[in-house]
Amino acid sequence: MINEYEQNALSDLLQALQIELLVASKTQVSNGWGETDSVPEYNKLYFICEGEGWIRIGGDDYYPQPGQLFLTPSHAKVSFSALNNRPYLKYWCHFTITAGPFDLFRWIGVPLCIEAADKTRMLSMFQELIEWHRQSSIVARLREKSLLLEIVCHFLSSVPIRVLQHRTEEMNRLNVIQQYIDSRLHTSISIDQMADAVHLHPNYFIAYFKKHFGMPPLKYVNRKRADRARQLLTTTGLSIKEIADRTGFKDTNHFTKFFRKETNFSPTEYRAASLT
């Protein structure tokens, strides 16, 4: 299971989440359906309606049944075939889902085959996903992205999630970065200081940070300052000056300009709006 630190690191990585549907369809496969040791660069998700089949991921064999969801992670070695002259009828989609620069399922480990908790809803979501995918409007692209994310959320909400062992060291380093920033939002924070906290050269640290968090370090720090200011404005009675001090601004006017740039509101306007 994911511990608190890993949860926080993944949560921030997911701020840069990108999900893209490549193709979605409903298919009655043939008895000749199958591949051996393919390594797709995208994720596959099947919702099995009828039939029998065999799927091997790495060295593990699976036999998905009707009513089950089956995930094939990207970059995994896959073999599969139909069985017993009862080839699958299935809904399916190919997609990418990235957190920062990495495919999400290369960061986390989950069971690959699960029983759909609400089969009627899953069927409806796949049908709607396919219908929107056939259309070419901007609204269709937004709808399919929303539906795909809902399907993936349904899958993940039904399974235990763990950070993959080979990602633990990386996750620990990201945790150190996050904790360093969170504990020093009331002070000035420099690139050199952040880099030193994880023993990286400042130039490498900038590229490393952007790769994992999807933005430059100082932009991330500003986002965190704005988040902290919003939280203090809506949950405490602290004065604007006190909140400015707690988010690293010694000058209230500077804080007000910064906050307006980040939120389109002055601190006073934001607090008043939260009370209405």
Image: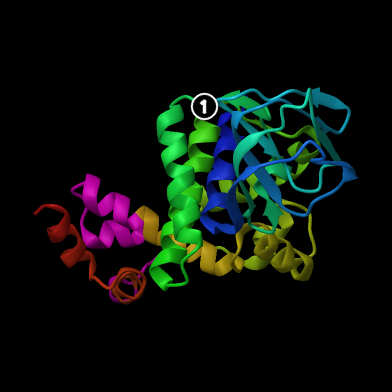
x and y percent of residue 155 in the render? 54, 34
Q: Would you identify the image quadrant in which residue 241 lies?
A: bottom left
Residue 249 shown left or right of residue 130 in the figure: left
- Residue at (69%, 65%) from the top-left corner? 192
- Residue at (38%, 61%) from the top-left corner? 226
> Taking 185 as reference, is 8 above or below it?
above
Nearer to us in this view, 173 or 94: 94
Magenta extent: 229-254
Residue 173 appears in the figure: yes
> Taking 171 as reference, is 208 above or below it?
below
Quadrant housing the N terminus = top right
Residue 128 shown left or right of residue 32 in the figure: left
- Residue at (50%, 60%) from the top-left corner? 133
- Residue at (66%, 30%) from the top-left corner? 110
Nearer to us in this view, 244 or 267: 267
x and y percent of residue 87 in the render? 72, 32
> Crowding near pointer 1: few (<14 within 10 Å), some, many (20+)?
many
The main secondary structure of the magenta stretch is helix
- Badge 1 marks a residue whose secondary structure is loop
Q: Would you identify the image quadrant in which residue 225 lies?
A: bottom left
Residue 118 shown left or right of residue 214 in the figure: left
Magenta stretch holds residue 156: no
